[in-house]
Image (cartoon, grey):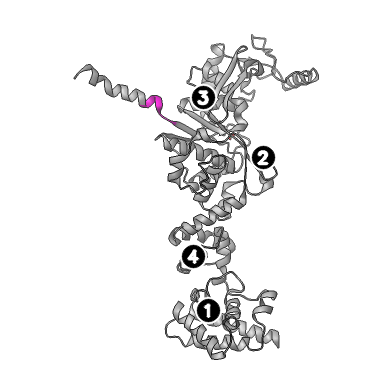
Amino acid sequence: MSPYLAGRPLFLFVIVEVFMVVTRFAPSPTGDLHIGGVRTALYCWLHARQHQGVFRLRIEDTDLERSTEASTQVILDGLNWLGLHHDGEIVYQSKRFADYDAIIEQMIARGQAYYCWCTPEELEAMREEQKRLGLPQRYNGKYRDGGEPVPGVTPAVRFKNPLEGSVSWHDKVRGVVTVNNSELDDWVIRRSDGAPTYNFCVVVDDAEAKVSLVIRGEDHVSNTPKQINLYRALGYDVPEFAHVPMILGDDGKRLSKRHGATNVLDYRREGYLPPAILNYLVRLGWAHGDQEIFSIDEMLQYFRIDDVHSAASTFNTEKLRWLNQHYIKESTPQALLPQLLPHFAALGVTADETTVLRAIPHYQERAKTLKEMAEHMSWIFVAPTDFPADAAKKAFKGGETAHLLQDLQTRIAALADVNVETLHDAIAACVEANGVGFGKVGQPARLAVTGGAPSPDLAVTLSLLNTTEILRRLQFAAEYIAQNQG
Ligand code: GLU
């Protein structure tokens, strides 16, 4: 084999290694999975999938007091529900304390980090003094060049941040960002309670996972120069960064619970479909011409992390509802069924699958959420026991209404075969035989069976019930009218 051919596979292997795209989503399990975090995860997922790369998930649970398993579960459920599946094993930072410690000890031995024996009171006094003098508040480097241990104090470990020069990176969203080292201090990498800090763990983990692009919220911009200095100190390759802007509520403040639901699982409970959420989030801070509807394939085709806007975007529930309605309309009844059924259970309604499946096409045009759809359909499974006063006054007025309902009952009872057509004919025959307008029969019959819920064409509406139930409801309404008019 010629040396050229022999060397080729290795050469290719090296290229693949160097250019492998790796992104990661690294939530802290200290609360819900915020809708803003989901957008970050979506951007990470899209970027990795677009480049045949790897999308990793890391649970940043170093804060043992605030991290909970329930919150981790919410994150996993949320991502899974949306189809943002990660590659490989999930990394839990809480399981890596020994690895972090080993690196911290090496850094101390190499003189890249040092023990700081300052007490919290001393640090507080330092800050107060700086405040008084109008200086920026930061660690004054007291133990940078050594110092005597203080009895009774467990030391923290601080990173020796460079004193000179600056840190600069080309952020894929914000452009070039430069920070002078003189603005940074020797930050803590391990607290006196032994816990390694976020800025330390994130660098070690991202470097170990060979993350090529860190996509995260812009609330982390101020951490990035510190992290870049640490990458360099540890001899790691520095990844690229993209800091995506905040999502605001309609009052211009950062989106929070005050504005409504922020936990993505609340959106599932409210009856939103995953493609609607993803479509909404991809557009929140990114555009492709004036296109609003994006399938996953289109997102993969058009999305570019470099095109994400640097200005904050405002959350608009109406637009999300509009998109949700679009995806409800576009879905097949079979695909909606399993997602819709839990909403009946949540309403305490026992629904029959076959009937729900038959009813879905008649409700797809109107419902903006699956919850709304289940609410609108509930009349099928729960017979009215009373009628809204206003609706009853309108639909049940006139002395002949009870009689008309009974006539309709008789005609339906006589049908050999009950289906949309025969029901339609029975209604028409009732209208004709009694010499009244359609509304005289249609309005009270509709109210009788649905109790006033939104419903499709009357014959279709009736066809969603079995014959016994139609007759029972018409009879109940006829008696109700007799009683209330008597
Ligand atoms: N754990 C951090 C957070 O939830 C994310 C850090 C990062 O992406 O670097 O805000």
In the picture of the structure, the residue carrying the numbered disc 1 is 469
In the picture of the structure, the residue carrying the numbered disc 2 is 254
Q: Establish if 24 lies above or below 322.
A: above
First in sequence, mark 4 or 3: give its number. Answer: 3
First in sequence, mark 1 or 3: give its number. Answer: 3
Find numbered disc 1 in the image and state the secondary structure of the residue it sits on: helix
Find numbered disc 4 in the image and state the secondary structure of the residue it sits on: helix
Q: Establish if 357 lies above or below 98.
A: below
Report the magenta residues as a range.
Answer: 16-21
| Residue 20 part of the magenta segment | yes
Q: Position of residue 193 (x, y in %)?
A: 64, 25
In the picture of the structure, the residue carrying the numbered disc 3 is 204
Dominant secondary structure (helix, strand or loop) of the stretch shown in magenta:
helix
| Quadrant field for ligand 1 | top right
Disc 2 + disc 3, Cβ < 8 Å? no
Tell me the CA gap for discs 2 and 4: 37 Å
Tell me the CA gap for discs 1 and 4: 20 Å
- Which amino acid, mark 3? Val
In the picture of the structure, the residue carrying the numbered disc 4 is 360
Disc number for residue 190: none
Query: Looking at mark 2, is its residue's CB closer than 8 Å to ligand 1?
Result: no
Is 256 on the left or on the right of 18, as rendered? right
Tell me the CA gap for discs 1 and 3: 66 Å
Query: Looking at mark 1, is its residue's CB closer than 8 Å to ligand 1?
Result: no
State the residue in front, 197 or 293: 293
For the point 60% across and 43% down, which residue is it?
32
Tell me the CA gap for discs 1 and 2: 51 Å
